[in-house]
Image (cartoon, rainbow, N blue to C red):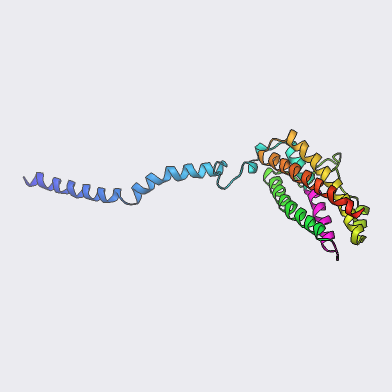
Amino acid sequence: MKRTLVPASLLALALALAGCGSTSEPGASTEASPGHSSMSSMSSMGMDHGSASPSSAAGEHNAADAMFAQMMIPHHQQAVQMSEIILAKDGMDAPILELANKIKAAQGPEIETMTGWLQAWGEPMESGSMDHSMEGMMSEDDMATLQQAQGDEAAKLFLTQMIAHHKGAVQMAQKEVAEGSDPEAVALAQKVVQDQEAEIKTMEEMLPAYQ
């Protein structure tokens, strides 16, 4: 009888210890490890959509997307510079100042967005080819003339130059809409077309007051 009872008690003790162990680290780590590994793999593959947008995946853009960002960034930068020149002048009419502020507020964040795309895509900030002209860009002389102008002459020059500048941006954006593949880049191009065509109309309506 003793030879039977002793192993049974030892067996009971072993089972009790095993039961305690199943609620602690070994069981927990066994359950958690596969899930953790899977989530880590999804994150490293860009599957975690909460932290990575589609545009951050280098494979989803094409040459047209890269060219759009590379050309539109300096184009936007010049529009912001033109707006800042007007905003720094004394005695400008309120509608002119309002327009300049609107352009600056819209295009500044778009510059940051496109810069982020190029970095995520692994593309240079500037195009390697100089064969592509940026429609509507002002020359250094144009910018100097705007800098020196005052009053109504400055307002007239700002509107005239910005209309041409916007028209160039619309052409570039329409090309991206037709040829781009990145959904976010195409969406931004569509927004540029919509916003800047509306601003062109507004500026054309304002211009006769300064003729």
Tell me the magenta residue range: 73-92
- The quarter of the rendered structure image containing the N terminus is top left
Viewed as shown, does residue 165 lie left or right of 10? right
Residue 12, position as x, y percentages in the image: 17, 47
Name the outermost residue toward the bottom. Answer: 90
Residue 113, position as x, y percentages in the image: 69, 49
Would you identify the image quadrant in which residue 61 lies?
top right
41 vs 71, nearest the viewer: 71
52 vs 12, nearest the viewer: 52
Q: Residue at image x 55%, y 46%?
A: 50
195 vs 117, nearest the viewer: 195
Would you identify the image quadrant in which residue 57 lies?
top right
Q: Is residue 133 above or below residue 207?
A: above
Name the outermost residue toward the left. Answer: 1
Residue 88, position as x, y percentages in the image: 83, 64
Question: Is 85 a magenta residue?
Answer: yes
Viewed as shown, does residue 70 lie left or right of 211? left
Q: Residue at image x 83%, y 40%?
A: 129
Residue 25, position as x, y percentages in the image: 35, 51
Q: Residue at image x 94%, y 53%?
A: 141
Question: Is 165 a magenta residue?
Answer: no
